Amino acid sequence: MTTLPKLPCFLNGDYTDLANAKISVMDRGFIFGDGVYEVVPVYGSRLFRFNEHMARLERSLAQVRIANPMARVEWQALAERLIADYAQSVGITPQSSDQLVYIQVTRGVAMRDHVMPSDVSPTVFVMTNAMKPPSAGQREQGVACVTADDFRWEKAHIKSVSLLGSVLARQISFDAGAVETIMFRHGYLSEAAASNVWVVKNGTVFGVPKDNLVLEGIRYGLIESICRAQGISFELRRIPRQELLEADEVILSSATKEVLAVTTLDGKPVGAGRPGGVYQRLFAGYQAAIAQTKVDAG
Ligand SMILES: Cc1ncc(COP(=O)(O)O)c(C=O)c1O
């Protein structure tokens, strides 16, 4: 078994550390994958797009009928305390501390029965880790992806901890030495194992509709607003497989990848085979949004 580090975390009201935090074997998160989660990026100790992440957490909880155990201000105070504790425990200054806060809420502990128990309190677990953004090489050269059929369930809009479909999907690209698996459902683009996918054609950024087949990444709104600010046309519509294969640029987005150019797909070059002009503009816009968060936070 992997030995867990003594990094700070929060479990059911207690500030503790990863090596000591323990849950019941009857937790429905463990038994059924019955829970939801969020991953919030942190730059210079400041939560990035926190309200948007909280709104998505509230939507996910409502979809699976778990009552939100805390108010937004309480989630924020909890996250900020862990961010500070983490920076202190690894010996870095708050200003240089880029992290990822992981929040998980499961339905709680009950004897095993598929039916949702009524008298149960949710299990709340929060931890934070160092942010591992793409390397300088990945930024300069872009990354390789592979394609696969989307065999996940049809409630991909819920940020559920039942992630076996995503684990199996991501492993396909890992085994091929690639960074993501871009998936298609009935011949149309859905998303990647842990990222949204953007297609650029003739200067327009295309994304797929925000329906039940994809997770609405927090970068959906951010990319749309960067496009608007920079005069780049932006459109959400269904994208047939062929359009992805013939794209000028393909871009991934997620909390950790931010925006990241895909330069080979199933071993073949995407467009010119290097990060394109629209990617460069989205990346610059994203970095400006991060810088603004630090300024706004004072
Ligand atoms: C399946 C899936 N789609 C999209 C995303 C991107 O979401 P976000 O931009 O909020 O990180 C993620 C993030 O983990 C994901 O797991």
Image: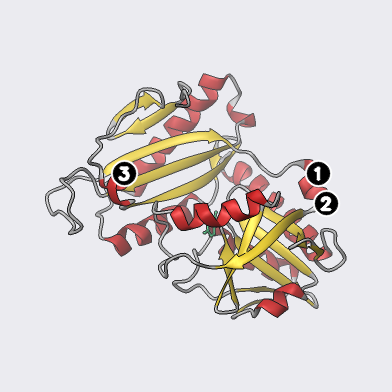
* Residue hosting label 3: 30
Image x and y of residue 137, in percent: 81, 44
Hey, which residue is sitting farthest front in the picture? 175
* Residue hosting label 1: 137
How far, Cα to Cα, is label 1 from label 2? 6 Å
Q: Check contact, mark 1 vs mark 2: CB within 8 A.
A: yes
37 up-or-down from 151: above or below: above
Could you classify mark 3 by the number of other residues whose Cα lies within 10 Å: few (under 14), some (14-19), or many (20 or more)?
some
* Residue hosting label 2: 141
Image x and y of residue 3, in percent: 46, 23
Q: Earlier in the sequence, mark 3 or mark 1?
A: 3
Q: Which residue occupies 58% across, 19% down?
A: 91
Amino acid residing under circle 1: Gly
Amino acid residing under circle 2: Gln
Q: Which residue occupies 58% across, 28% down?
A: 94
How far, Cα to Cα, is label 3 from label 1? 38 Å
Q: For the N terminus, give its image quadrant.
A: top left
Is disc 3 placed on a helix, strand or loop? Answer: helix
